[in-house]
Image (cartoon, rainbow, N blue to C red):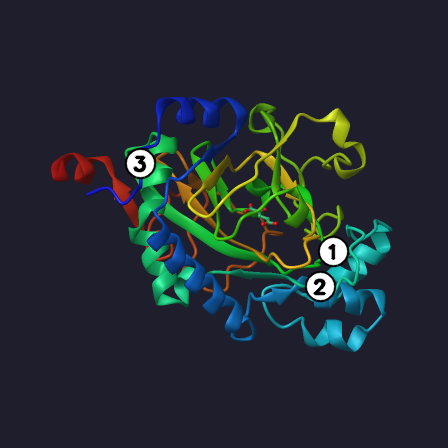
Amino acid sequence: MTKLARPVTKDEIAAYNVAGVVLLRGILDLQTVNSLRGSIDEAVRTLKESPAGYDLSFLTRAFEADDNATLKSESGGQHNVSDIMDFIKESGKPLLVDKVEQSKGSFLLDTGITSRLRDFRRFTLNGAAPEIAAALLGSEKVNFFGDQVFVKEPRTRERTAFHQDATYFEIDGDQCCVLWIPVDPVKLENGAMMYVRGSHRDGRLYQPNVFITQTPLPGAQGEPLPDIEGNMADYDIVHFDVEPGDVLVHHYRTVHGAGGNNSRYQVRRAASLRYCGDDIRFKTRPWAPKQLHHTQRLNEGDPLSGPDFPVVWTRRNEQEAA
Ligand SMILES: O=C(O)CCC(=O)C(=O)O
């Protein structure tokens, strides 16, 4: 039985293929969104227990204050924060921050929540999300690939630098999509996602960056991403005002970014879920962020399999159930 509030339409699938991003309005019912909001809040409450949980605003303040002791103390988890911050300094590139009055909010992020929180796992592996991915990927089967949550509290100045997910992920192929699922109303003022239309089709693989600046991750290969933030008018950028119940889906090669949260009151919480189809193969990218929750490592060229990448949807099961 479908878990979607309504089916994904042919026009939406065509829009995803052409633009590399589509907004699915009202695709989730509010009970589903309320449950996801609870899971995101739990992830935030337990952020310090996660080896991949970061308060990026806390880190940027420590960076600006040359507080090396703090940066070192934050370096034992997914990222060597201290080395990355040194690398940013050497690059000479600025932190990407908006002018926000009394900027006391934080940009929080965590990775691998599916492996640590049961209700979140229920949503990512059994809920409506795999069905949405299946509709857009047009695949015989869908594997779960990974997740993050992104929270920008009111008055958060940190932007999300424009980037392309593909080179953060240790995979190759075409059938990978990312569901960005807001649980709050989001518009430009509080950090709406922005996408460079059609960028998934330009054949380029860009260096991944450090998210709060254009500085690439240390050792990252790929083409340098141009300065999109500084030349927004030169790009075909789309953004969408979204409401709880809406889902934005982008191709993993679509370039995207976001502003800070300039709102005085409205938090901006979202889950980002990644799903893959038949043609995806494992590809080593030594600079990719460590996935500390993974239990095994695939070999170059392997199809996704095993407990880290469970099959969450098959066309066959769908047809048998119908
Ligand atoms: O929420 C954000 O600011 C970034 C989200 C993102 O880059 C993603 O979901 O791929």
Q: Earlier in the sequence, mark 1 or mark 2?
A: 2
In x, y percent, where is residue 136? 38, 32
Residues at badges 3 and 2 in contact (C-beta under 8 Å)? no
For the residues marked 1 and 2, what is the alpha-carbon distance in whole angstroms? 8 Å
Residue at 75 percent across and 50 percent down: it is 213
Q: Distance between the residues labelled 1 and 3?
A: 36 Å
Q: In this view, does 79 lie to the left or right of 169?
A: right
Q: Name the residue under label 3.
A: 6
**Kind of residue indicated by mark 2:** Ser
Residue plotted at (58% across, 58% down): 151
Disc 3 versus disc 2: nearer the observer? 3
In front: label 1 or label 2 = 1
Q: Quadrant of residue 229?
A: top right
Residue located 32% across and 46% down the image = 128
Question: Which residue carries the number 2 mark?
Answer: 57
Q: Earlier in the sequence, mark 3 or mark 2?
A: 3
Quarter the N terminus occupies: top left
Query: Disc number at residue 157?
Result: 1
Q: Please say if the residues under marks 1 and 2 sit with CB atoms less than 8 Å apart.
A: yes
Between 219 and 122, which is closer to the camera in this rendering?
122
